């Protein structure tokens, strides 16, 4: 009786052992890639849901959707996706007039853009920060981020960005009645306009 029980147990062990064959490294990578893709789709759906909620003024619900998307992107180390989610969070908080949080999230977008060396995302973040500080009438911060934008524009050889940064700087210094700086940046803006032969770029 004892012998037959032992035999039965050994058969069970053999059966279960054969059921759990370890995955090869390639199979493991395939499973991981599949999981990441599923999570990415889920995050994209949450972003889209958040956008629709924001459009219909369901701002608190939109914040939740964007936060959930952000957490997923963080989990799969999709930094560009995380930057998108942070940007949307920033914009919703600005709609709620909570500029402290709006600025905080947008500065995180800026940090991601720089870590990814993505000039378009960096320019977008800098422009948005300038917009927020314009709403707050904080001229020093406007100048700080517009100057960073000007450096980026010149490094990227993007005339449109350069003109926008120069225009912002000239306008801000005009508000501060620093006309020497106004003339300086307006003249630089004129040079950019002449280089691209676009009179609309004149400051």
Image (tube, helix red, strand yellow):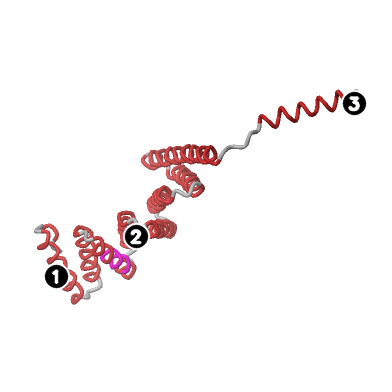
Q: Are marks 2 and 1 in contact (CB under 8 Å)?
A: no
Real-space Cα separation, disc 2 to disc 3, in angstroms: 78 Å
Q: Secondary structure at mark 2?
A: helix
**Residue at image coords 16%, 73%:** 183
Real-space Cα separation, disc 3 to disc 1, in angstroms: 99 Å
- The magenta stretch spans which residues? 144-150
The quadrant in which the C terminus is found is: bottom left
The quadrant in which the N terminus is found is: top right
The disc, 2 or 1, on the residue closer to the chain's N-terminal end is 2
In the depicted view, which residue is nearer to us: 108 or 138? 108
Neighbor class of circle 2 (other Cα within 10 Å; few <14, some 14-19, many 20+) is many
Q: Which residue is mark 3?
A: 2
Q: Which residue is mark 2?
A: 129
Using the rendered image of the protein, determine whether residue 3 is visible from the camera's viewpoint. yes
Q: Secondary structure at mark 3?
A: helix
Q: Secondary structure at mark 1?
A: helix
Q: Which residue is mark 1?
A: 187
């Amino acid at each position: 009786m004892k012998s037959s029980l032992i035999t039965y147990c050994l058969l069970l062990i053999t059966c279960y052992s054969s059921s759990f064959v370890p995955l090869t490294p390639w199979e493991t990578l395939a499973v991981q890639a599949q999981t990441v893709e599923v999570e990415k789709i889920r995050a994209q759906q949450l972003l889209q849901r958040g956008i629709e909620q924001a459009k219909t003024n369901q701002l608190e619900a939109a914040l939740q959707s964007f936060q959930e998307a952000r957490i997923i992107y963080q989990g799969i180390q999709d930094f560009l996706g995380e930057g998108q989610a942070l940007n949307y969070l920033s914009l919703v908080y600005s709609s709620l007039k909570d500029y402290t949080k709006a600025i905080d999230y947008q500065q995180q977008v800026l940090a991601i853009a720089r870590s990814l060396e993505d000039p378009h995302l960096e320019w977008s973040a800098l422009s948005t920060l300038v917009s927020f500080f314009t709403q707050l009438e904080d001229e020093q911060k406007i100048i700080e981020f517009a100057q960073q934008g000007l450096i980026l524009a010149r490094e990227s050889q993007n005339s449109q960005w350069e003109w926008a940064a120069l225009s912002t700087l000239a306008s801000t210094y005009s508000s501060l009645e620093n006309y020497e700086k106004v003339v300086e940046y307006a003249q630089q803006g004129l040079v950019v306009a002449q280089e691209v032969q676009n009179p609309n770029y004149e400051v």
